Amino acid sequence: MKTRSIWDSGFGIRGIIALVALAVLGLANPARAEVKIDITRGVVEPIPIAIPAFYGTTSSESNFGRNIAEVVSNDLVRSGLFSSVDPRSFVQDANSLLVQPRFADWRVLNAQALVVGKIEAQAGGKLKVEFRLWDTFSEQQMTGLAYFSIPSNWRRVAHIVADAIYKRITGENGYFDTRIVYIAETGPQTKRIKRLAIMDQDGENNRVLSDGRALVLTPRFSPTMQQITYMAYYNNRPRVYLFNIDTGAQTVLGDFDHMTFAPRFAPDGQRVVFALSDSGASNIYTMDLRSHRIQKLTSGSSISSAPCYAPDGKRITFESDRGGSQQIYVMNADGSGAKRISFGDGNYGTPVWSPRGDLIAFTKMHGGRFYIGVMRPDGTGERELIEAWHVEGPTWAPNGRVLMYFKEAPSSRGSRPKLYSIDLTGYNEHEVSTPTDASDPAWSPLLP
Amino acid sequence: MRYIATVNDDSLKNGLAVSTGLHFLMFLFLFFGLPRLITPLPSHHEPVPFDIVTLAEITNTRIQDEVPEQKAAPPPPAESKPQPPTPSPAKQEAMPEAVLPKPMDKPKAPAEKPAAQQQDLLGSVLKNVAKLKPVQTANTAEQKADTKTTSSSSFGPALSSRLTITEEDALRRQISQCWNPPIGARDVQSLVVEILIDVNPDRTVANLEVVDKGRYASDSFFRAAADAAVRAVRNPKCSPLELVPEKYEQWKRIDFTFDPRDML
């Protein structure tokens, strides 16, 4: 019985052969790693990066080199993913860096990455800006690029350099070469002046676009960059407008008898989705900018508003009180298949689809407090990033990694909103400095 | 029956043949078993999984002074602690391409349209102000490390010379403190990086290779994750590696897998 049961089990000779083979294989492969280690937890901290002034031979070149290095450093540090190694501790000058970085020196300063750059004035008045990004541990060049530009454009070049470094180290597209439109607020509470303004994402090059005679709200960038859409009260008529940044021309979107508001471009830039208010109800419409054809997407007597396309243009998220309280819904781009996705406590509004497609940012009101949070398009994974007395109007950086919004604290002097940005992880909140009070920010795509 | 008849007929004449035949029959029964008259119970051969873990406190108790000082090891051929500023010519020769790629007027990658994905970005290291539970930030490596990893295979070296789980945990904890993965990246849970390292006898890293070279070359997110893993094992803060010098044969080649799953 014993023999047969072994035979029946299929062990027998085959088993012995397998055992021998395994033993032989095990012995015959001495180069195989004997130790396997799984690392499943790490730390979350900024990567220390050293950015010495870019080298220039003339004093003008050196000036540009210093300024560009500073802007690059500020961009990266503001992202929260990098920390700047103090320039006062640098032990190698810019000139010798170009020959060969002394990596051991930079490692002593705990610099994990090193940026070495050079400025050269070209014939014809252009500047050549080149840089190399070094990994100081492996002593390898991670990337190296050169740009040509007119000198007055040095800030943009610095942002583009910062984007290249950010992309190489994080794997994600950068967002530094972008702009923000927002509402610049001035004047007393009773007679508030709200004007359209635009600035670089770091707060520089601030420019006011409208004269302040009309109240302007909810500006949004077109993905094609030439246009902004917003709602404005001209002659006390609240309507949606289009504004060409290059020409300054302003046109009204369609000629409706009713109030139109909460506009936003479709991802292809060819359509605008907006809300239209009619006898107490509010519904969502789209308008094709070429044919001016209008399509009504929602119907009924409830208030549906704040529509926003998914980055693939196939779905739209919006807020609606059709279920009794204000909640977030997702529907197909033709208006079919609307489904509620927010189910937490409180009211939800201003949904904004991430350019990455993976999340929807929103404003939530609960228990007398405001929150800004994110959830997946199916409503799962809700997470609140910010809580405040009043915080509202999230907008995504084009890489879907950073959110900007406006926030205000209770004040005896009335409403004093300011712009802030925060990383998707919920850390690294920064105030974005503006010359005046500011609200309703909208992030541009990367500049063309 | 034929054999019995033969015995009856030919008396003891064929005794030898009968004996041989019966022995042969018995041998056959022994080898193949008796005819299957009763269905045997099904034999259960369910595998019983077990893991040999080497516990230092129990199995490897030894007197401390037996441990040879690691000074006996050959001089470090590669970097160790941060050095004073003296550039080593050998390192400079080893420098790979120091050449700028061709200058570009506008190296603008068109903003990729990320496919609509519903990936998980939410987790323990990510902040949620609505939850009252204490927020985990950096230093999460201090948390209890995953001890599921086992040391090599069951055909490995003798238990006493293998790394104990305590020793593996020490190494894991050390490298965790130097690993800063791109946790906010899209699809971060898929960014699992395997790195093989050769270790010098002085416990510094000699060579390393990222196993998935194809993905490293084609996927910028994976490349960033792999670079972060490489920085972890190259970080001077984590050098030399926390290993027992006497077990050099066991740890001269280490297979690291960096998987941020516990941070999500």
Image (cartoon, coloured by chain):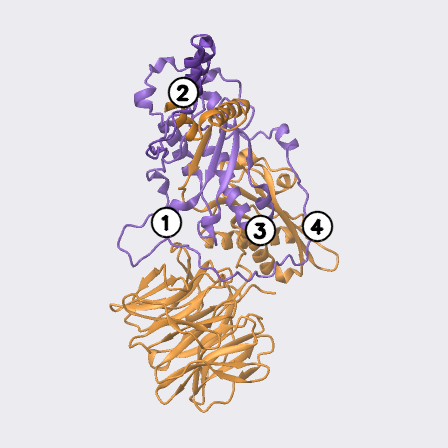
Chain colours: A orange, B purple
| Count of numbered tags | 4
Question: Is residue A389 among what the camera can see?
Answer: yes
Q: Which residue is mark 4?
A: B102
The residue depicted at 24 percent of the width and 68 percent of the height is: A367
Dot 1 falls on a residue whose secondary structure is loop
The percent coordinates of residue B20 (x first, y second) are 46, 12
Task: Give me the disc on residue B125.
Answer: 1
Q: CA distance from mark 1 to mark 4?
A: 40 Å
Q: Are marks 1 and 3 on the same chain?
A: no
Q: Nearer the viewer, mark 3 or mark 4?
A: 4
Q: Which residue is mark 3?
A: A66
Q: Which residue is mark 2?
A: B30
**Label 4 is placed on what type of residue?**
Lys
Camera-side residue of B164 and A352: B164
Where is A137 relative to B58, above or below? below
Q: CA distance from mark 2 to mark 4?
A: 81 Å
Q: Nearer the viewer, mark 1 or mark 3?
A: 1
Camera-side residue of B236 and B131: B131
The residue depicted at 46 percent of the width and 50 percent of the height is: B188
